[in-house]
Amino acid sequence: MKFSKLITTVAVAFSVGTLATQAHAAKSKVTTPNSQHLTFKQLTGNNSHRLGTIRQLTRSQIATDHKLSGKQVQYLMALPLPHRLTARNFTLDSQTLTMHLTKNKLNVKIAKIPLSKLSGIILNRYLPKTLWYHKPATTNQKVVALTFDDGPDPVLTPKLLKTLKKANVPATFFEVGSSVIKYPQISRMVLKYGNQIGNHSWNHPQLTKIGKAKAIHQIAATDAAVYKATGTLPSFVRPPYGAINETIGAAFDRPTIQWDVDSLDWSYLNTPKTVNHVLSTTHNGSIILMHDIHPTSVAAVPSIINGLKKRGYKFVTLEQLIQKPLLSNYQYFGRNDFRNL
Ligand code: NI
């Protein structure tokens, strides 16, 4: 218990008498402040992207812990959660960050996030040593991440999943909610085969052109569809056409995943041209954009995997590619290119 220690330290310092001694005593003795006195500013190292990530982890935790309905999941983006780094509405113990919520439609009062989910999100000094975040060691290994948009497709997506599995290659699928409700079993299969699912809106409008309320609904309805299909919320968003602005992006509270290699598969609709384009434009740390709704694209994947493997590339997840925790309200274009919204 650190609070009584703080009182003792300050009391001793006062009895010694000088301000300088007091400051020194406080600095050297009090290393872990009681969480009553912590703010998100301290917890996150003054980083609003990390606070946004904590907000989204809170939403995911509530969805799972309370077995929310699809309709309740659609409300999660409107849940009142702290936006100020000076806020103190949480408590921290050796295992859990407990968020204390203000009155809300879900009647949820607290959300308990295990600290194991917060490695790299809150500063190491507030975590048990076993959970400290360490930067991955740098290697010369060339890496690349595959992403597939606009599915799930009932025929092509399973075909692609088998190709990826056979080659032991992970990918991220940015799915549209209107297809997820038609083929929820395909979304489950995407996860079962070791891939990740991101949110690609409900029916693919340009989110920056339809107004904030509709844009939020596009993402919220897709969250609900993916959650109903798989029991989890998508951790990433890829807005259709990559079109995003600060107002809309801030409402998602998630990393926006862009790309730096557009396969142009949607334009070529030709397997050899798609393969050649990807092989000639990929570089170390690239995020490759493809679509699992065109037969010519899915047919291109085996040659793309073989070609890039021959050129020394390893296929990795987005987290492995970026080599640090992906944070809310940043846009990621590739390993060395991330930007504010
Ligand atoms: Ni798309």
Image (cartoon, rainbow, N blue to C red):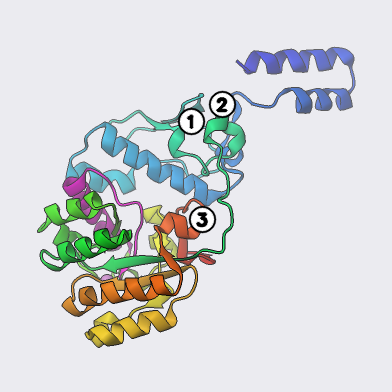
Relative depth, front residue between 207 and 286: 286
Magenta part mainly helix, strand or loop?
Answer: helix
> What kind of residue is marked 3?
Gln
**Vertical comparison of 10 with 31: above or below:** above
Q: Earlier in the sequence, mark 2 or mark 1?
A: 2
Label 3 C-beta lies within 8 Å of the nearest ligand 1 atom = no
Q: Position of residue 191 (x, y in %)?
A: 24, 51
Q: Are marks 2 and 1 in contact (CB under 8 Å)?
A: yes
Question: CA gap, disc 3 to disc 1?
Answer: 28 Å
Kindly identify the residue that appears in the image at 46 percent across and 60 percent down: 321
Whether 74 is drawn above or below 273: the answer is above
In the displayed structure image, the side of residue 78 where residue 54 appears, left or right: right
Circles 3, 1 touching at the beta carbon (< 8 Å):
no
Query: Amino acid type of disc 2?
Result: Ser
Asked if one can make out residue 105 in the rendered structure from this viewpoint, the answer is no
Query: In the figure, residue 263 lies in which quadrant?
Result: bottom left
Residue at the front extreme of this rendering? 310
Q: Which amino acid does label 1 sit on?
A: Phe
The image position of residue 146, as x and y in percent, is 35, 66
Q: What's drawn in magenta, residue-wise?
A: 212-240
Residue corresponding to mark 1: 90
Residue at numbered disc 2: 35
Mark 3 highlights which residue?
A: 323
